[in-house]
Image (cartoon, grey):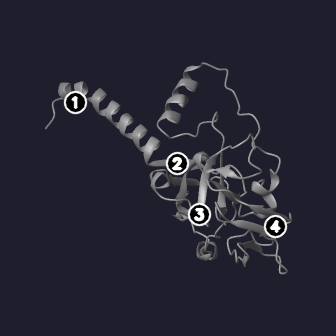
Amino acid sequence: MFKKGSFLRELPVIVVSALIISIVIKTFFLHFFFIPSGSMENTLQVGDRIAVNKFGALFSEIKRGEVVVFSDPDKWLGEAPISESSSISNKIKSGLITVGVLPDPAKQYLIKRVIGVGGDNVTCCDSSGKVQVNGISITEPYIFPGDRPSEIKFNVDIPKGFIWVMGDHRGASADSRYHPESANNGMIPLSKVVGRATFIVWPFTNAAFIPKGEDLKKVPVQEKP
């Protein structure tokens, strides 16, 4: 049984240790993100909080069909907001951002599904309106009901070290298709990928593993001469 004085002396150590562990987890293993828009409906809903596996992305290749979080590659979201206030509440908020409880408004992130990886050719669309990867038409059950796979035609070859991404709500996602004039022609450098979105943690009614695109996983990588 702890004495009152002993507990009070140890409390700062406990708090600091908990903060250090939280920061280490956020930096190297797991990060939590808030979904602010409907670009990934109905897979992810506005207001969902998701767990992102950062550790796995460091040691294994990003694959087609996976849902990934990445930092804004070329101001797709415009300029990040700047906070000029130095109030106590903002300092508390900054502390919560540091430990991963709140999102950092100064860092712009997006979440999309990987449709193509380095070495792939991705086109839209075949005679039935489906996206093709390396000449194979893809069935995409995760697409928002009523949306077509894409209203925009494209034909892209993805270089090594990049991915091509699209939102599941194709009619409400300003993804790789909409940035042909950006620094990498709409493709995302793997260095910008934060990690794989693996699980919806909140609200509890939506809690579930985030599904991968099974058809996309089956497509072999196209060999380049």
Residue on which the image places disc 3: 66
Q: Which residue is mark 2?
A: 32
Hey, what amino acid is under mark 4?
Answer: Ser
Query: Residue 159: x percent and y percent?
Result: 67, 56
- Snapshot quadrant of residue 16: top left
CA–CA distance between discs 3 and 2?
A: 17 Å
Other residues around mark 4 within 10 Å, as few (<14) / some (14–19) / many (≥20): some
Q: CA distance from mark 4 to mark 2?
A: 29 Å
Q: Quadrant of the N terminus?
A: top left
Mark 3 touches mark 2? (CB < 8 Å): no
* Label tally: 4
What is the three-letter code of the residue carrying label 3?
A: Glu
Judged from this view, the residue extending furthest toward the front is: 225
Q: Nearer the viewer, residue 37 or 123?
A: 123
Q: Nearer the viewer, residue 128 or 169?
A: 128
Which numbered marker is on residue 7? 1
Earlier in the chain: of badge 4 and badge 2, it is: 2
Judging by the rendered image, the residue that carries numbered circle 4 is 150
Of the numbered discs 1 and 4, the one sitting upstream in the chain is 1
Nearer the viewer's eye, disc 4 or disc 2? 4
* Quadrant of image for the C terminus: bottom right
Q: Position of residue 136 (x, y in %)?
A: 71, 78
